[in-house]
Image (spheres, helix red, strand yellow):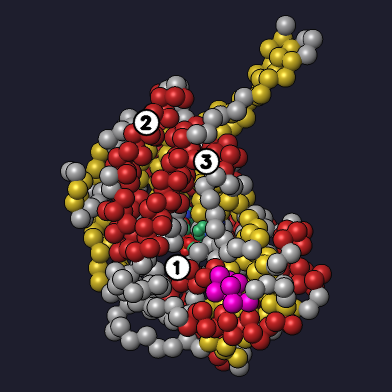
C-alpha cells in the first residue's frame, strides 16, 4: 500500500513534526491470520517528555492562531485524507480484522467527522445590564492526551483530534497497542499541514497512557476505553486535577414491544448485537422481548444470525470477521463456557470455525437466562447475546436500567410515541427508537453512570476541550 509519497507499511511515532523510531519495537497481530503485522516503535519515557514539552510549546501559537486559519488547516488535512481513504480502509481491515464494508464505513465516518467539525463555531455569550457587560467565552484547555481503544482506532482518535485542534488545543494521541497503525499514519499525514507539536502521536506499550495521565503539563485526558481503565484514569488525574472526558463501556438493552413487525425487526436487532462481532461500545448487549412474541421473535433472530458469514477480513463473502485480539477472544470464550456450564439454553449455539489460525467465533444466542447470569450482567463485547422475556413495562424498564452502565439503549415498537416515551426513561447517553445504535458525529456520544463522564461529538462535545471564562467589563 503506497500512494502519493506516503508509505502505509512503515510506521513511526511523531514528535515535534518529525518521525521517531525507537530502540525497542513491537508489532500487532492480524486477527484474521495471527500473522505479525508491521513493526512500530515503542515510545520511551524520553519521547513522552519531549511530546509533552513540544505540545506545550506549540500550544502558545496554535491557541492564538485565528479560528478561521485553524479551520482552513483542518480542511486541508481533510483533503489530504480524502486521497488515502482506501489506504486507511485496508489498514483497518488488517489491524482490526474488519470486513471491507465495516472498515470502509469507519474510514468514511472520518470524513463525516471532518464535515461536522468544520461547521462548528465556538459560541460566545454577552449579557449586558446597566453596570456591566459579561462575556462568556470558551478558551482552549491546553495540552490534551487522547487515549484510544482498539475497536475503532481511526474514527475515535480523529474524533478527539479535530475538536482539540479546532478549539486551539495541542494534542498527543496514544493509540491502543492492539491497533496502532491507522492512528500513527493519520497523525503522520497531518504533519504536512500543521505546525510541529500541534498534533503528535506516541504509542508502543501500556506504560505510555499512565505517564501521560500523571504528567503535570498535560491539561486534559480524553479517554475512550473500558470502565475499569476509566476509573484508574480518573483516580490518577485527581493528582493534577486534570480535566477528563471518559467514554467507557456499556451493557446496552433493547426493549421489543409485541406490536413490531417481527420479520423486519428481528434481523435489525440481530445486526445491532453482532455488528463487528459485537465489539462496539453501543452494540446491543441484552435483548428484552415481550413474552407474547418471544418464540417467533427469537426464531427470526436465530434465522437472521445464522445467515452471518464468519470469515477472514479480506474475503468478499465475510459479513463478520474475527475478534480483534486474543485477550477479547478468550474473554468471550469464557462467557460462552460459563453459559454452557450453567446449563443455559442456547437458541443458537456457537459452532466450530475451521480456518486454522485466527480469532474466530461464530455468533450465538442464549435463550432467556436468569437476570443474574454473567452473560446478562457483564459487558460481553463479543458475538454472544442473551434474549430475555418480559411482560410488564415498568419491570422491563427497571431491568434495562438495572446495571451500573448507561451508554446506549434501544426501544422498538410500531407505536413510535410509546417507544419514545419509554426511551426517555432509559438511563443512557444515547437512546435509539426503532433502530440499533447508529451514531452520528453530529450528535453527542456520552455515557451515564459508569459508562462515562462528559461526552464527545455533536455541538456540545467540542466545548469539553475548553475552559469557560467570563470577562466582566464594567461601564
Ligand atoms: P482499555 O481500557 O483496555 O484500553 C484503552 C486504552 O487505555 C488503551 O490505549 C490502553 O493502552 C490504555 N490504558 C490502559 N491502562 C491505562 C492506564 N492505567 N492509564 C492510561 N491508559 C491506559 O479498553 P479497550 O479494551 O481498548 O477498549 C474496549 C472498551 O472500550 C470496551 O469496554 C468498550 O465498551 C469501550 N469503548 C467505549 C466507547 C464509548 O464511546 N463509550 C467507544 C469504544 C469503546
Q: Residue 73 carries which label?
A: 2
In this view, the residue farthest toward the top is 475
Label 1 and label 3: CA atoms lie apart by: 30 Å
266 part of magenta stretch = yes
Q: Where is residue 223 in the image (x, y as percent from the top left)?
A: 51, 51
- Which quadrant of the figure has residue 38? bottom left
| Residue 433 vs residue 386, the one in the foreground | 433
Name the residue carrying label 3.
220
Name the residue carrying label 1.
276
Instruction: Indicate if the residue with disc 1 has its beta carbon within 8 Å of ligand 1.
Output: no
13 on left or right of 461: left
- Which quadrant of the figure has residue 89? bottom left
Tell me where the magenta segment starts and ends, as one range: 262-269
- For marks 1 and 2 on the same chain, the one whose residue lies earlier in the sequence: 2
Quadrant location, the C terminus: top right
Q: Is mark 2 on a helix, strand or loop?
A: helix
Q: What element carries label 1?
A: helix
For the question of whether residue 218 can be seen, the reply is no
Residue drawn where x is 58% and y is 73% of the image: 264
Q: Position of residue 231 (x, y in %)?
A: 59, 57
Label 3 and label 2: CA atoms lie apart by: 23 Å
The crowd level at tag 3 (other Cα within 10 Å; few <14, some 14-19, many 20+) is many
- For marks 1 and 3 on the same chain, the one whose residue lies earlier in the sequence: 3
443 part of magenta stretch = no
The crowd level at tag 1 (other Cα within 10 Å; few <14, some 14-19, many 20+) is many
Q: Position of residue 155 (x, y in %)?
A: 43, 51
Q: Is mark 3 on a helix, strand or loop?
A: strand
Q: Where is residue 22 in the image (x, y as percent from the top left)?
A: 24, 50
- For marks 3 and 2 on the same chain, the one whose residue lies earlier in the sequence: 2
Amino acid at each position: 500500500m503506497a500512494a502519493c509519497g506516503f508509505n502505509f507499511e512503515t510506521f513511526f511515532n511523531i514528535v515535534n513534526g518529525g518521525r521517531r523510531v525507537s530502540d525497542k519495537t513491537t508489532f500487532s497481530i492480524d486477527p484474521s491470520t495471527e500473522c505479525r503485522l508491521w513493526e512500530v516503535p515503542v515510545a520511551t519515557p524520553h519521547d513522552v517528555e519531549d511530546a509533552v514539552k513540544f505540545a506545550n510549546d506549540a500550544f502558545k501559537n496554535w491557541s492564538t492562531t485565528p479560528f478561521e486559519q485553524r479551520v482552513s488547516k483542518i480542511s486541508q488535512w481533510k483533503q489530504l485524507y480524502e486521497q488515502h481513504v482506501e489506504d486507511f480502509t485496508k489498514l483497518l481491515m488488517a489491524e482490526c480484522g474488519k470486513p471491507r464494508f465495516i472498515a470502509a464505513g469507519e474510514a468514511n465516518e472520518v470524513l463525516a467527522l471532518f464535515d461536522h467539525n468544520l461547521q462548528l463555531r465556538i459560541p460566545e455569550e454577552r449579557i449586558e445590564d446597566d453596570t456591566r457587560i459579561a462575556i462568556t467565552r470558551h478558551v482552549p484547555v491546553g495540552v490534551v492526551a487522547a487515549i484510544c481503544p482498539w475497536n475503532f482506532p481511526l474514527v475515535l482518535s480523529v474524533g478527539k483530534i479535530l475538536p482539540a485542534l479546532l478549539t486551539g488545543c495541542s494534542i498527543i494521541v496514544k493509540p491502543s497497542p492492539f491497533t496502532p497503525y491507522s492512528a500513527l499514519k493519520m497523525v503522520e499525514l497531518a504533519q504536512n499541514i500543521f505546525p510541529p507539536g500541534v498534533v503528535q502521536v506516541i504509542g508502543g506499550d501500556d506504560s505510555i497512557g499512565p505517564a501521560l495521565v500523571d504528567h503535570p503539563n498535560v491539561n486534559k485526558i480524553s479517554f475512550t476505553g473500558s470502565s475499569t481503565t476509566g476509573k484508574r484514569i480518573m483516580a490518577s488525574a485527581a493528582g493534577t486535577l486534570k480535566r477528563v472526558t471518559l467514554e467507557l463501556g456499556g451493557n446496552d438493552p433493547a426493549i421489543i414491544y409485541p406490536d413490531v413487525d417481527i420479520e423486519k425487526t428481528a434481523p435489525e436487532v440481530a445486526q445491532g448485537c453482532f455488528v463487528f462481532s459485537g465489539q462496539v461500545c453501543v452494540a446491543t448487549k441484552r435483548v428484552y422481548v415481550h413474552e407474547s412474541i418471544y418464540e417467533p421473535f427469537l426464531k427470526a433472530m436465530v434465522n437472521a444470525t445464522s445467515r452471518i458469514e464468519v470469515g477472514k477480513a479480506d474475503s468478499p463473502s465475510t459479513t463478520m470477521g474475527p475478534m480483534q485480539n486474543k485477550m477479547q477472544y478468550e474473554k468471550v470464550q469464557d462467557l460462552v463456557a460459563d453459559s454452557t456450564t450453567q446449563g443455559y439454553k442456547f437458541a443458537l449455539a456457537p459452532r466450530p470455525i475451521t480456518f486454522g489460525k485466527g480469532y474466530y467465533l461464530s455468533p450465538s444466542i442464549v435463550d432467556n437466562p436468569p437476570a443474574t447470569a454473567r452473560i446478562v450482567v457483564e459487558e460481553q463485547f463479543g458475538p454472544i447475546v442473551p434474549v430475555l422475556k418480559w411482560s410488564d413495562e415498568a419491570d422491563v424498564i427497571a431491568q434495562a436500567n438495572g446495571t451500573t452502565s448507561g451508554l446506549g439503549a434501544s426501544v422498538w415498537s410500531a407505536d413510535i410515541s410509546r417507544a419514545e416515551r419509554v426511551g426517555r426513561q432509559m438511563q443512557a447517553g444515547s437512546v435509539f427508537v426503532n433502530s440499533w445504535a447508529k451514531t452520528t458525529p453530529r450528535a453527542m456520544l456520552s455515557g451515564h453512570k459508569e459508562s462515562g463522564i462528559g461526552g464527545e461529538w455533536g455541538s456540545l462535545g467540542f466545548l469539553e476541550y475548553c475552559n469557560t471564562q467570563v470577562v466582566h467589563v464594567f461601564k
